[in-house]
Image (spheres, grey):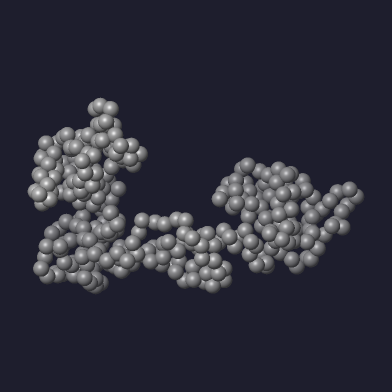
Amino acid sequence: MANFKNAIYRYRVLDRCFSNRLVKYDINKLIEVVSNALRDVGINEGVSRATIYADIAFMKDSKGYSIDLDEEFKDGRTRYYRYSDPDFSINNMPLNEIEVDNLKSAIELLSQFKGMPQFEWMNETISKLQQNIKPAKQKEIMSFDANQYLKGIEWLGELYNSIQYKKVLTITYQDFNAPDPYELEFHPYYLKQYNNRWFVFGYNPAKDIPTWNLALDRIKDIKQVKGKYRPDQTNWDEYFDDIIGVTIPENKKVEKVELSIASNTAKYILSKPLHHSQTQIKMLDSDQVHIVLKVMVNRELINTILSFGDNITVLKPAGLRKEISSIFATALTNYN
């Protein structure tokens, strides 16, 4: 992509040279001007004679810009370059085949972000591009792990803007275990996605907790209210540093969680760590790998361990080992 962008930039510089009737550009002058222009935008590699000749050939080609150069523009044996038509410029031309193909690919990629609040401006832009470019429907070759039909996603835009513009909210919310919805004042600070669910973190004045989190799929209504917005003072990178997921349990400390992993699963976990603190200690035997995590034990960690079934065994701490064992014992009873 970088090489393609450099080429497009060179074509634009050459276009300005070919359009200029006040300066005579031979091949050496073109190399100098293009090289200087690239350096001005931080590209220090320069260009060769062969590159400029190849650029001119492409610009003359029908797949490029079909430019017409004045073949009689010479001084002795020196060949100079300018457009035959003094009013011609590639900026006035429709997109060429390569530009259209690249723009089609860009539209396909950008369309994946439609509906996300920070990319709302794309919706109208993409529609206009599609009307003009009319990209042919192609078999998809890329997708993102996002569910646009996810319950609660309709609140993303409003929460995003409320964080950006520091608005106090009244949120109607219903916990999983609550029989009825209830209202709470909320100062939103941070949006986070985990396991294909969205959560909003912020200040809950009733609890006086600046890191209260709400699941978007449990929100029933949001209203902006008058009130002084409490500034966000949390470093969110550090906040999530010691956990898997979004939940920080009360009165929990970071612990060394030691796991024994079956070798067939270890390859997966070693290539995609469960947590950034993950370290491999040793091979317990030919079939088991010993790893250590330094994390707080929370529900998300437990669910992650359970998701690997009998391929992971908790060695330490004893409390976590006992809890996982109890869950498997209950599951076995259910099946019996």
Which residue: 61% across, 43% down?
44
Query: Vertical placement of 106 versus 267: above or below?
Result: below
Which residue: 27% across, 31% down?
287
Indicate the quadrant where residue 285 lies: top left
Indicate the quadrant where residue 282 lies: top left
270 vs 333, nearest the viewer: 333
Q: Taking 21 as reference, is 200 left or right? A: left
41 vs 251, nearest the viewer: 251
* Location of residue 124 in the rendering, given as x and y in whole percent from the top left corner: 47, 71
Q: Residue furthest front?
A: 336
89 vs 205, nearest the viewer: 89
* Location of residue 271 in the rendering, given as x and y in whole percent from the top left corner: 35, 39
Q: Taking 214 as reference, is 77 left or right? A: right
Indicate the quadrant where residue 99 lies: bottom right
Which residue: 58% across, 60% down?
101
Q: Residue furthest right?
A: 76
